[in-house]
RNA sequence: GGGUGCGUAGCUCAGUUGGUUAGAGUACUUGCUCGACACGCAAGGGGUCACAGGUUCGAAUCCUGUCGCACCCACCA
């Protein structure tokens, strides 16, 4: 069979993908052997494979394939994530192009569109992973929103709710006006941007010409100001305390209060308080029982509630009508102009301020107070902390443990509700009759449904106060109490008329009616992800898969979702299974471009892994990524890496061609017993390469087991290219091309053994090429995928062979060096004389004469014991031997002299290091004796070498 | 403000607990189409290991500080 000179991956990859699939080799089922389980970090359904995915999944595949070959029941569960906001955005954009708006078609229709889209794009990313060679059990594909996973989500929510861990409260959350939803702290990105700090003068009430100046970066929020705060110890403002200020343009009368929170050194030392739009201000407001006024709505437009005073009554001399309904930035412009006109703008300064942006659409978020569902984190975090301290989960590399612990220690309650449609709708039902004020603001059409005049947004606002007065007929006193403790609208397990249930309850136990309304919010996409390691095995059902595979062995992921995902999975695992979901967490770096920048579509610097697979081959992509996958470090990839990996694949391809070209059937049949039965027939070079291979097996195994794919790749590259190809293959040629059938057979067998083990060692990293060669070599139906991974065998270590071959290699290299330096033609053979330093050396060199002859192009080797040096020769020293390359007619004596002198110089420099050591009394006294001995020997060697070289120079000039 | 990581050859990076002449790939120079491979072979040049101190007989490696880069957390009127 003709085998091509270069490795052509395309057809070969296709062939083996089909083969593996046909043989059902990825599949795993609970059985009597030990499982090794990984659950995939589910990529978003929107996703198409990028380098980050490629790396992440490659690393998983390496471990899975490695464990499979080591006899484990390897199970890798694939799946996708519904991706919440991200996915909704994508579909919204598509629909918009067709002129369809989400708001117009309504929730039900929109969700139909979402599912339709999901069906069409399907699991395209998973098929891309398949192409990458990922050996996932495709029979186990899960989706976070499929029936089973949704069941798990509902179950978890209901259990947590019933335990009292889930509650609805009002908080300031980061709100994305574009996506129309609350965002979690981990879903926003902060960036410093150039902005301005405006100094605005607020007139003091009833004191003409007197002002208090506040500094702000967001002047438009002043429309919702309900106080001004100063530090109680600030002498400058003490006389203002208790007085009121007049909010410019709005003319709302607001109190001047004292609060420790204010830093007298910042700005003017006086702060405007906008409780509805700033976390600190909300806290301050709470401490001082201040009312809150929404100035900005969910679309980031100015609200009409700013026309009210602190008692909820419209302000008579309100002057900011033209701001109502304007976008926040437009309103800011107008506002600043107006303040300038009124001479209330003291000054403006350039200022760098942090802008918080939505991680999905990069819109600047708006801090808004809104009703959201929260999961209490305190106890769950404590348990996770304990578990981490007990090392129930270990982090690789370990450095990630600390930030993880720190995060847990400072954990706030998790906002789990999102005001979007794509996701798991919260399984809570409100009785229309009993749930009362809890229902407020749930749906946009709610006010009309209840025949409530005006806008109702949230308790505590002007709107709802009006509603409470008019509809609930509460007394002003009662309302004040409710507003004061912010409890209105909060829900927990004790709230009347609220029911947690997967399906709509039949009857309300309080009133007997069946008029329910479901909470419209959906859960944070990470809520379902947090249950993933359990839900993929059928939890909450006690399935046999769950019992067999859970807890899983390792989670492999990038550090960007350590908090968002990893921590939460651990907490949920502890909560519901009483056990962490995995023993190891292996955290890898981020893939960056050649300039060290994070790859992103907006930067246009993404390298498409599919393109790389096309251009260089999938194995090359895999090897390059593994090679760069250094623990704890981000990696830069560029074509250079892929080229290197492609060349490596080709090298492997060609060495296997070489082996197969030199085989006869006998060798194939005899393996592996031949070597065992004829260990005597092994030559030094065989023993050497087998010993080196054995060491490589040990080190590669260790590297993979300690999650260091880079180390494993480097070791294999080094062994295959620099030891096996560069030396053993060359050594073996003289034997393979010779006439001694016995030694020929031995060589063939050793080649097969080495090659086969190399293929197995490399298979987890480069599955395609190794399978192809493996099958060509043995022509047997069993896949390399399920062959045994090579095992380290102490008895294979051969120190003598190692030392002796090293000497042979040095001799060859020395002769080659001389030939090259003296411009000896490639085709010219040379004679050499070796002055032997010891009997062992003579024996070694004599036994390996054929290799020196062929690899260094030597015609004849003579040994000499006399002190006489051959003239017209170039010399080199290897160990205690002197090598003379006879170069009559070819040698340039002057050049040789220079060459030898430079060698001597090098030795002198090197000797200095050792001389310094040896002349240091403390070194002799304190260093360990072996080191002293080593240094002494080394120095002796160097001195001998120098002496010989000097003598050789003398001989030259004679 | 708190933390983490990094700074080694022109470039991209290895370098395990301190102890061979600090390595690899690539780029560079020179020579090779001879029966695996020019995606190759052989030989070579190239580094004050960011800087300054300290510990040690001995430091790229451990400690302290400085500078530069990257990232994370918190605050920010």
Image (cartoon, coloured by chain):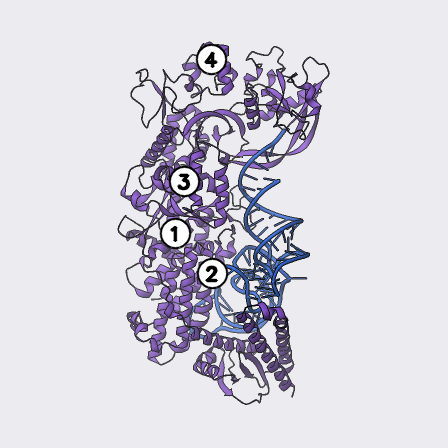
Chain colours: A purple, B blue
Secondary element type, mark 1: helix
Q: Position of residue A542 (x, y in %)?
A: 28, 39
Q: Earlier in the sequence, mark 1 or mark 3?
A: 1
> Which residue is identified by label 1?
A61
- Which comes sooner in the sequence, label 4 or label 1? 1
Give the residue pinned by disc 2. Answer: A714
| CA separation in Å, label 3 and label 2 | 34 Å
Q: Marks 4/3: CA distance?
A: 42 Å
* Element under disc 3: helix
Residue lying farthest front?
A: A925
The percent coordinates of residue A60 (x first, y second) are 40, 50
Distance from Cα at disc 2 to Cα at disc 4: 72 Å
Foreground: A208 or A592?
A: A208
Residue indicated by mark 4: A468
Query: Marks 2 and 3: in contact by CB < 8 Å?
Result: no
Q: Which residue is mark 3?
A: A569
Callout 3: chain? A
Q: Secondary structure at mark 2?
A: helix
The count of marks equals 4
In 3D space, how far apart are the residues under numbered discs 2 and 1 (Cα atoms)?
18 Å
Residue A157 against residue A873 in the figure, above or below: above
Circles 1 and 3 in contact, beta carbons < 8 Å: no
Question: Vertical placement of A629 versus A469: above or below?
Answer: below
Residue A858 visible in the displayed image: yes
Say which quadrant the N terminus of chain A sits in: bottom left
- State the CA–CA distance, disc 4 to disc 1: 60 Å
Do tags 2 and 4 sit on the same chain?
yes
Question: Cα distance, mark 1 to mark 3?
Answer: 21 Å
Local SS, label 4: helix
Q: Quadrant of residue A107?
A: top left
Of A258 and A752, nearer the camera is A258
């Amino acid at each position: 069979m003709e085998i091509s000179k270069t490795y052509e991956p395309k057809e070969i990859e296709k062939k083996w993908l089909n083969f593996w699939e046909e043989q059902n080799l990825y599949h795993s089922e609970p059985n009597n052997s030990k499982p090794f389980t990984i659950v995939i970090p589910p990529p978003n359904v929107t996703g198409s494979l990028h380098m980050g995915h490629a790396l992440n999944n490659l690393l998983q595949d390496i471990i899975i394939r490695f464990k499979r070959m080591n006899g484990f029941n390897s199970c890798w569960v694939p799946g996708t994530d519904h991706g919440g906001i991200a996915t909704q955005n994508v579909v919204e954009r598509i629909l918009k192009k067709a002129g369809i708006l989400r708001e117009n078609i309504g929730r039900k229709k929109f969700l139909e569109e979402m599912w339709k889209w999901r069906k069409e794009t399907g699991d395209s990313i998973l098929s891309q992973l398949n192409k990458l060679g990922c050996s996932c059990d495709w029979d186990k594909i899960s989706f976070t929103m499929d029936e089973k996973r949704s069941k798990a989500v509902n179950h978890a929510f209901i259990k947590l709710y019933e335990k009292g861990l889930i509650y609805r409260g009002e908080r300031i959350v980061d709100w994305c006006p574009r996506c129309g939803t609350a965002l979690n702290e981990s879903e926003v990105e902060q960036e410093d941007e150039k902005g301005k700090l405006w100094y605005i003068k607020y007139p003091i009430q009833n004191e003409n010409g007197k002002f208090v100046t506040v500094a702000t970066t967001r002047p438009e929020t002043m429309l919702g100001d309900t106080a001004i705060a100063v530090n109680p110890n600030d002498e400058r403002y003490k006389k203002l305390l208790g007085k009121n200020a007049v909010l410019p343009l709005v003319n709302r009368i607001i109190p001047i209060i004292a609060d420790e929170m204010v830093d007298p050194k910042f700005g003017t030392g006086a702060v405007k308080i906008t409780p509805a739009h700033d976390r600190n201000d909300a806290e301050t407001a709470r401490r001082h029982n201040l009312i809150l006024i929404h100035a900005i709505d969910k679309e980031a437009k100015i609200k009409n509630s700013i026309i009210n005073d602190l008692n909820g009554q419209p302000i008579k001399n309100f002057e900011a009508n033209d701001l109502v309904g304007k976008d926040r930035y437009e309103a800011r412009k107008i506002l600043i102009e107006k303040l300038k006109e009124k001479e209330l703008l003291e000054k403006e300064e350039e200022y760098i301020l942090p802008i918080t942006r939505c991680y999905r659409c990069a819109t600047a978020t708006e801090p808004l107070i809104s009703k959201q569902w929260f999961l209490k984190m305190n106890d769950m975090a404590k348990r996770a902390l304990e578990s981490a301290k007990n090392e129930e989960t270990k982090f690789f590399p370990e450095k990630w443990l600390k930030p993880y612990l720190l995060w847990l220690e400072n954990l706030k309650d998790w906002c789990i509700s999102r005001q979007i449609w794509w996701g798991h709708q919260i399984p809570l039902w409100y009785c229309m009759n009993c749930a009362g004020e809890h229902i407020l603001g749930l749906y946009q059409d709610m006010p009309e449904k209840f025949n409530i005049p005006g806008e109702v947004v949230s308790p505590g606002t002007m709107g709802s106060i009006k509603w409470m007065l008019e509809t609930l007929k509460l007394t002003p006193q009662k309302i004040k109490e409710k507003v004061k403790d912010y409890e209105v609208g909060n829900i927990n397990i004790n709230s009347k008329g609220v029911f947690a249930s997967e399906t709509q309850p039949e009857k309300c136990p309080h009133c007997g009616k069946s008029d329910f309304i479901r909470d419209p919010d959906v859960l944070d996409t990470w809520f379902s992800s947090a249950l993933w390691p359990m839900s993929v095995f059928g939890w909450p059902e006690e399935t046999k898969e769950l019992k067999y595979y859970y807890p899983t062995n390792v989670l492999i992921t990038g550090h960007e979702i350590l908090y968002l995902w990893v921590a939460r999975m651990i907490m949920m695992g502890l909560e519901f299974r009483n056990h962490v979901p995995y023993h190891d967490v292996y955290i890898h770096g981020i893939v960056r471009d050649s300039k060290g920048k994070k790859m992103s579509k907006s930067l246009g610097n993404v390298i498409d892994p599919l393109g790389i697979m096309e251009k260089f081959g999938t194995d090359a992509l895999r090897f390059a990524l593994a090679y760069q996958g250094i623990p704890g470090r981000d990696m830069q990839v560029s074509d250079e890496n892929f080229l290197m990996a492609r060349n490596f694949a080709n090298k492997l391809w060609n060495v296997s061609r070489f082996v197969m070209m030199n085989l006869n059937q006998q060798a194939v049949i005899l393996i592996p017993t031949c070597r065992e039965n004829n260990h005597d027939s092994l030559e030094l070079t065989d023993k050497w390469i087998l010993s080196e291979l054995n060491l490589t097996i040990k080190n590669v195994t260790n590297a993979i087991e300690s999650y260091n794919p880079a180390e494993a790749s480097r070791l294999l590259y080094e062994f295959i290219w620099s030891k096996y190809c560069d030396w053993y293959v060359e050594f073996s040629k003289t034997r393979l091309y010779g006439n001694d059938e016995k030694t020929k057979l031995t060589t063939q067998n050793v080649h097969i053994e080495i090659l086969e083990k190399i293929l197995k060692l490399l298979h987890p990293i480069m599955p395609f090429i190794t399978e192809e060669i493996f099958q060509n070599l043995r022509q047997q139906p069993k896949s390399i995928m399920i062959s045994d991974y090579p095992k380290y065998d102490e008895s294979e270590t051969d120190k003598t062979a190692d030392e002796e071959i090293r000497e042979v290699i040095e001799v060859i290299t020395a002769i080659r060096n001389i030939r090259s330096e003296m411009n000896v033609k490639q085709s010219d053979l040379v004679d050499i004389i070796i002055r032997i330093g010891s009997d062992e050396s003579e024996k070694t060199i004599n036994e390996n004469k054929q290799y020196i002859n062929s690899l260094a192009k030597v015609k004849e080797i003579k040994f000499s014991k006399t002190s006489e040096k051959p003239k017209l020769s170039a010399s080199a020293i290897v160990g205690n031997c002197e090598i003379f390359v006879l170069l009559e007619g070819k040698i340039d004596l002057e050049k040789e002299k220079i060459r030898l002198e430079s060698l001597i110089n090098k030795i002198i420099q090197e000797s200095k290091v050792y001389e310094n050591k040896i002349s240091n009394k403390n070194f002799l006294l304190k260093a360990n004796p072996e080191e002293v001995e080593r240094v002494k020997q080394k120095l002796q060697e160097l001195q001998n070498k120098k002496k010989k070289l000097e003598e050789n120079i003398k001989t030259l000039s004679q």
